[in-house]
Amino acid sequence: EADIYQTPRYLVIGTGKKITLECSQTMGHDKMYWYQQDPGMELHLIHYSYGVNSTEKGDLSSESTVSRIRTEHFPLTLESARPSHTSQYLCASSEEPSGSGANVLTFGAGSRLTVL
Amino acid sequence: GQNIDQPTEMTATEGAIVQINCTYQTSGFNGLFWYQQHAGEAPTFLSYNVLDGLEEKGRFSSFLSRSKGYSYLLLKELQMKDSASYLCAVRDSNYQLIWGAGTKLIIKP
């Protein structure tokens, strides 16, 4: 049973459209992340948040924006989609490191975006 | 720069044992993770190593040598459902995760 939900799972849209990828988690985690993953390639961090009203850009330059108005919700928006944005987008969350320090990520099922 | 190296693809036989290696060069080290990712699905956590040595969890074990910048994931008694990509990730001195490109493991009957 998934504790982190992403919608839509699949999206095909035309160039120039505005899109929002939704991500919600029910675990009460403070930390949330957006990753981009292309086939056979490593995950690239594009945005992260350590709590409400906190957002940071990741390592991968991205034209997307995020917001964190509620703990459970971390949507990602592309104002004007381009074919170069075609990719899989993975949302994840984690809690503060415990004594073990593991800070394990829980991922959503992903949103596969195709921009024509 | 920071990088994680893993073999792109490996093939093994059902019931056998396979070892997937991961070498890393990062700015600092605060733990190494292994995740499993089936095709079209989300990565799921397998193991975490922060101290040198072997961590065993059922059919899966993970080993770490910090001095060598090296880890491996050992899968025993392979099953067809183990066909997946295995991702190695290292948490650096800024507590950011650096990911490898993953090793696609193909299990043959």
Image (spheres, coloured by chain):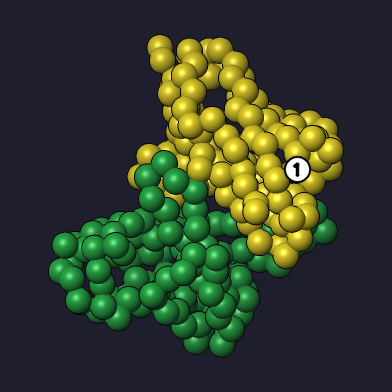
Chain colours: A green, B yellow
> How many neighbours does mark 1 have within 10 angstroms: few (below 14), some (14-19), or many (20 or more)?
many
The secondary structure type at the circle numbered 1 is: strand
On the rendered structure, is B17 left or right of B11?
Answer: right
On-image quarter of the C terminus of chain B: top left
Residue B73 image-quadrant placement: top right
Q: Is residue B87 above or below residue B54?
A: below
Residue B84 position in % (x across, y down): 45, 33
Image location (x, y in percent) of residue B57: 69, 33
- Establish if A63 lies above or below B25: below
Q: Is residue B31 left or right of residue B108?
A: right
Q: Position of residue A62 (x, y in %)?
A: 42, 71
Q: How many marks?
A: 1
Name the residue beneath numbered marker 1. Answer: B49
Q: Is residue B18 above or below residue A35?
A: above
Report in which chain the residue with disc 1 lies.
B
B45 vs B72, nearest the viewer: B72
Quarter of the figure with residue A52 = bottom right
Residue at screen point 50% across, 58% down: A44
Viewed as shown, does residue A14 lie left or right of A63? left
Quick check: can you spot residue B18? yes
Q: x%, y% of residue A32?
A: 55, 69
Which residue is rendered at x = 76% and y = 60% of the image? B93
Query: Which residue is pictured at 55% across the width and 69% down the height?
Result: A58
- Compared across the picture, whether A97 is left or right of A74 comes to right
Residue at image position (72%, 65%) is: B94
Instruction: Look at the image and tell me whether residue A104 can be seen.
Output: no
Q: Residue furthest front?
A: B1
Q: Amino acid at mark 1?
A: Asn
